[in-house]
Image (spheres, rainbow, N blue to C red):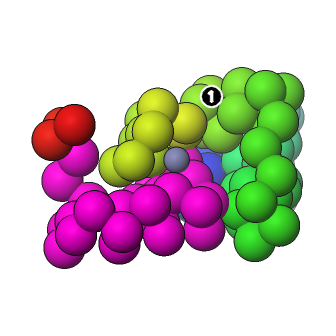
Amino acid sequence: MTGPEHYRQAEWLLDRAHYFTYGDGLDVAQGHALAAEAQAHATLALAAATAMHADIAASAADIRDARLDEWIKATSSTTCAECDHPVPAGSAYCSALCRNAADDHGADEPAGGDE
Ligand SMILES: [Zn+2]
């Protein structure tokens, strides 16, 4: 599950939790269970957003760190088109260095694989 998916799941579960706890559902135990699950998804969404933010900052500064890579790898299934560093979903390259390297050898698209 991606960060945004965790976020949406947390919102949906929170809505259901409110319904069961205070609304017509009136099953407080169920409401509490849903609220706990919503909290877990919200925490995972926050972790993913924090890792993505750190990755963006590191890419801008061309700083890569194994600990950051571990977080990005855990929250993303995509790797850099130029090297094997993990990148957040939607990004092609892990850093400006890799983007420039791809430009230097004429890669129009980040298809990867050639060389
Ligand atoms: Zn790279």
Q: Provide the residue designation for mark 1.
A: 74
In this picture, is 12 found above or below 42? below
Q: Position of residue 79 (x, y in %)?
A: 43, 40
Q: Position of residue 100 (x, y in %)?
A: 48, 69
Q: Is residue 103 left or right of residue 110?
A: right
Total number of numbered discs in the rendering: 1
One can see residue 30 in this view: no
Q: Is residue 37 left or right of residue 82?
A: right
Frontmost residue, 17 versus 99: 99
SS category of the residue bearing label 1: helix
Give the residue drawn at x 35%, y 49%.
81
Residue 106 lies in quadrant: bottom left
Extent of the magenta region: 87-112
Q: Position of residue 108 (x, y in %)?
A: 19, 73
- Specify the principal SS of the magenta part: loop
Residue 78 lies in quadrant: top left
Q: Is residue 62 left or right of residue 85?
A: right
Q: Position of residue 115 (x, y in %)?
A: 22, 37
Specify the amino acid type for callout 1.
Ala
Q: Is residue 55 left or right of residue 80?
A: right
Residue 89 magenta? yes
